[in-house]
Image (tube, coloured by chain):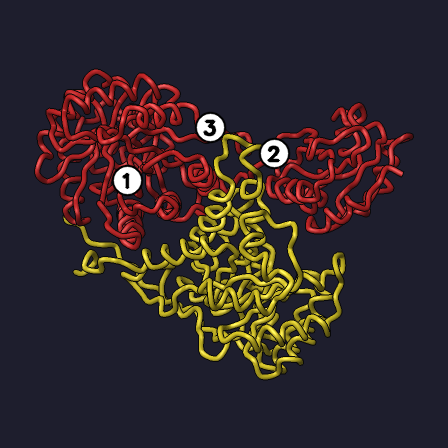
Chain colours: A red, B yellow
């Protein structure tokens, strides 16, 4: 939580030397509190003040990065409990548990899947990004970690109770910032020492939130900033309880000892693979930073990646489709041409109905800054003198020379004007108002 | 600094609405499944869909489950009740669609009556979202079933007077439908109550978007509905929420497209079932009280999720 001007004033030299550019230390403090001045502007600031102010301006949920380069997974930096209040910042790192109980072929195939699985959704590449490696034997652990790093290049979580085993496995890849899992009441000092020495993040794990907060406080006392919390929730209800209370404590109470991202292991909660995916969806919706699955079956990973994207998309910036002509059901020169706006929901609804109709069609998506048809029309963006030039430049003429354009039923009133703007050879037809009526409309449509 | 669980209590309570003879939904005094700080006296209800005409376009995964009953809504409803463990039936009157079979209000009412008489779990009757036709049909439905406690919907602003009046006359609950907007949902509730519909006879359908198709919009709308109801104690928002999710999730490309066409997507049946189950689970976390669902395996998964969510170590917050 930010400090007030008065709290900051108490940390300053109180000499009113004016060297910062403000008439008094109090005025400077007020500007600092408002975020309109930098502490460095004061030449006499003490280390103590710097630490206190830096601490106060840290995000309520600390940022943690595991992995490096393209495969780095950054989580944390969250500031709200509800996504509509601002937005959720960093999608959880979805990953897979790999253990020494698996045979080589399974390990290799999981690592290959981890490297290759990628889905494109509304212009974003979504992928699982994390390998959580577990082995009882320290030698096997180090070997598996090295293999995972080499073959998948993923962000790596190293799982062992013994600090020496963690160190041996982590040291060769310490620049890749693996996450050490986990420090508990029993081994905190040893694991924390390895994390400090290798400069890598580590997880803390405890059965109760009180005990977890005590470990979190120890981490803060040791000046650790990159820590991940595992509340070891034993039921789905406890997942909701733990994740909610941790996030609430961090955001609403600025409770620093729990002001870190979390990790969850739906892979350990059930043997039913389908149920595991449903459990994982609760972790994704409810604040988890890392979510570890038992395998990477694409049919179960795909919905979880979509869910991460949905929950973490910025509600203040509507998802938009790129402007352009989208072919659906393999259209040809005689296929109907529909035009609508690039609001993602509009696109999804229209395209899925066109797809369901099984009628090949061209869908012209016009950039109106992600507004729906009626909103864009009211804002003067989805109107005749904007749509006509878009269509002419879109290249649809070459693809479907019949030049008969179907506009959404809700903007029937612009059809005459659009006809005029488009000029000779074009024909504007008024389509349906509701997307659900598109299949019937298209089935009855013909170029004549 | 020792940890004190930041428990929050709410000012408002969601109203209980009764379906059928004695099944209740709503009644929450806290956010969804926050059992450590409030009550959720009724488990969320899973209403399984029945259609009044065959659905040949459905994906294989769901078509094969209902193939034997597709042309018999009574058998379909009994299958959902007796074999698939439905809490309720949502009868989707697809036959009345003016752009489809355009069946008469009388024939739709007849179907409703037959289904209602064949089952002993609550029945919800849903039109197609064509305001004029829905009003005409739902009026006939309530007249044909004067004594049964059957919620009817979707009621929209444009037909709320017609359907609301019919529902009031026969003491039926209504499901008010608005298009992904908190204020519109509230406004419709105001209109319905001004008309005289009792507040404990209103259910909110705030529009459902499937996973990947606008789920995040309805997730946040529902969260905001619940914040208004529980934290601001807004009496016009304290109604149970219904999500008509099955038609949306099974329309999504990702739950239909075969592995042959999209080799990287994995098994289509697994995908379709999870598309429905994960959409439903996410909506539960946002505040849904009645889930309208289709695939029996998705229903089982969501039931397991509900049981899981209800399993909590309350000593974690004991002070």
Secondary structure state at the residue bearing disc 3: loop
Determine which quarter of the picture holds residue B193. bottom right
Image-based side of B2 in relation to B80, left or right: left
Label 3 marks a residue whose chain is A
Pick the front one: A377 or A442: A442
Query: Along the polypeptide, which appears first: circle 2 or circle 1?
Result: 1
Residue located at (18% from left, 27% from top): A46
Query: Along the polypeptide, which appears first: circle 3 or circle 1?
Result: 3
Determine which quarter of the picture holds residue B28. bottom left
Q: What crowding class fits label 3: few (fewer than 14 Cα within 10 Å), some (14-19), or many (20 or more)? A: many
Q: What crowding class fits label 2: few (fewer than 14 Cα within 10 Å), some (14-19), or many (20 or more)? A: many
Task: Give a yes or no on whether discs 2 and 1 share a subunit.
Answer: yes
Examine the rendered structure and indicate whether residue A22 appears above or below residue B28: above
Percent position (x, y) of residue A14?
A: 21, 33
Residue located at (14% from left, 46% from top): A211
Q: Which residue is mark 2?
A: A321
Residue located at (57% from left, 44% from top): B252
Image-based side of B164 in relation to B31, left or right: right
Q: CA distance from mark 2 to mark 3?
A: 19 Å
Secondary structure state at the residue bearing disc 2: loop
Percent position (x, y) of residue A3?
A: 27, 41
Label 1 marks a residue whose chain is A
* Residue furthest front as drawn: B68
Q: Which residue is mark 3?
A: A118
Determine which quarter of the picture holds residue A183. top left
């Amino acid at each position: 939580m930010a400090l007030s001007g008065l709290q900051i004033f108490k940390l300053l030299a109180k000499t009113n030397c004016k060297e910062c550019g403000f008439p008094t230390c109090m005025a400077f403090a007020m500007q600092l509190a408002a975020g309109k001045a930098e502490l460095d502007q004061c030449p006499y600031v003490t280390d103590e003040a710097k630490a206190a102010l830096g601490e106060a301006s840290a995000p309520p949920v600390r940022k943690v990065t595991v992995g490096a380069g393209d495969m780095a997974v950054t989580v944390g930096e969250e500031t709200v409990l509800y996504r509509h209040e601002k937005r959720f910042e960093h999608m959880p790192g979805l990953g897979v548990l790999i253990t020494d109980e698996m045979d080589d072929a399974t390990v290799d195939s999981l690592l290959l899947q981890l490297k290759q699985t990628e889905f494109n959704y509304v212009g974003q590449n979504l992928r699982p990004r994390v390998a959580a490696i577990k082995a009882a034997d320290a030698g096997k652990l180090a070997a598996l970690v090295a293999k995972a790093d080499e073959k998948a290049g993923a962000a790596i979580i190293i799982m062992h109770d013994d600090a020496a085993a963690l160190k041996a496995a982590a040291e060769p890849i310490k620049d890749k910032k693996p996450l050490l899992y986990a420090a508990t009441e029993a081994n905190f000092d040893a694991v924390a020492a390895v994390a400090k020495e290798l400069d890598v993040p580590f997880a803390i794990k405890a059965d109760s939130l009180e005990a977890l907060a005590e470990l979190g406080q120890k981490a803060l006392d040791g000046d650790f900033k990159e820590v991940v919390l595992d509340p070891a929730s034993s039921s789905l209800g406890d997942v909701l309880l733990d994740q909610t209370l941790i996030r609430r404590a961090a955001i609403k109470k600025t409770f620093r000892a729990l002001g870190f991202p979390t990790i969850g292991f739906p892979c350990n909660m059930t043997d039913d693979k389908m149920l595991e995916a449903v459990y994982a969806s609760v972790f994704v919706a409810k604040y988890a930073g890392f979510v570890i699955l038992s395998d990477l079956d694409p049919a179960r990973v795909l919905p979880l990646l979509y869910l991460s994207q949905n929950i973490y998309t910025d509600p203040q910036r509507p998802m938009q489709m790129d402007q352009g002509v989208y072919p659906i059901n393999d259209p040809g020169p005689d296929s109907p041409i529909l035009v609508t706006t690039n609001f993602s929901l509009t696109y999804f609804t229209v395209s899925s109905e066109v797809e369901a109709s099984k009628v090949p069609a061209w869908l012209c998506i016009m950039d109106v800054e992600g507004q729906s048809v009626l909103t864009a029309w009211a804002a003067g963006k989805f109107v005749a003198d904007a749509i006509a030039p878009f269509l002419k430049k879109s290249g649809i003429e070459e693809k479907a020379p019949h030049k008969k354009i179907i506009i959404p039923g809700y903007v029937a009133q612009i059809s005459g004007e659009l006809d005029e703007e488009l000029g000779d050879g074009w024909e504007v037809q008024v389509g349906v108002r509701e997307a659900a009526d598109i299949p019937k409309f298209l089935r009855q449509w013909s170029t004549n | 600094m020792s940890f004190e669980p930041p428990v929050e209590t709410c000012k408002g309570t969601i109203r209980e609405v009764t379906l059928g003879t004695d099944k209740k939904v709503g009644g929450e005094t806290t956010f969804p499944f926050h059992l450590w700080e409030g009550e959720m006296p009724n488990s969320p209800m899973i209403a399984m869909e029945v259609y009044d005409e065959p659905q040949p376009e459905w994906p294989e995964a769901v078509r094969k489950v209902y193939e034997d009953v597709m042309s018999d809504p009574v058998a379909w409803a009994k299958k959902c009740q007796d074999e698939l463990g439905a809490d309720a039936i949502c009868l989707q009157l697809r036959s009345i669609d003016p752009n489809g079979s355009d069946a008469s209000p009388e024939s739709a009412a007849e179907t409703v009556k037959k289904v209602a008489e064949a089952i002993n779990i609550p029945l919800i009757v849903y039109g197609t979202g064509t305001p004029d036709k829905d009003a005409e049909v739902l009026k006939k439905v309530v007249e044909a079933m004067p004594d049964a406690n059957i919620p009817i919907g979707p009621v929209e602003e444009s037909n709320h007077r017609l359907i609301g009046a019919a529902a009031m006359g026969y003491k039926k609950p209504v499901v008010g439908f608005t298009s992904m907007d908190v204020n519109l949902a509230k406004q419709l509730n105001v209109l319905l109550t001004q008309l005289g519909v009792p507040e404990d006879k209103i259910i909110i359908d705030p529009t459902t978007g499937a996973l990947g198709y606008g789920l995040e919009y309805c997730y946040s709308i529902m969260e905001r509905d619940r914040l208004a109801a529980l934290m601001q104690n807004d009496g016009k928002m304290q109604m149970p929420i219904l999500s008509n999710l099955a038609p949306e999730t099974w329309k999504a490309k990702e739950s239909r497209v075969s592995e042959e066409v999209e080799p990287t997507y994995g098994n289509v049946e697994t995908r379709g079932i999870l598309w429905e189950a994960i959409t439903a689970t996410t909506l539960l976390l946002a505040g849904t009280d009645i889930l309208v669902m289709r695939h029996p395996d998705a229903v089982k998964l969501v039931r397991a999720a509900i049981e899981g969510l209800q399993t909590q170590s309350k000593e974690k917050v004991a002070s």
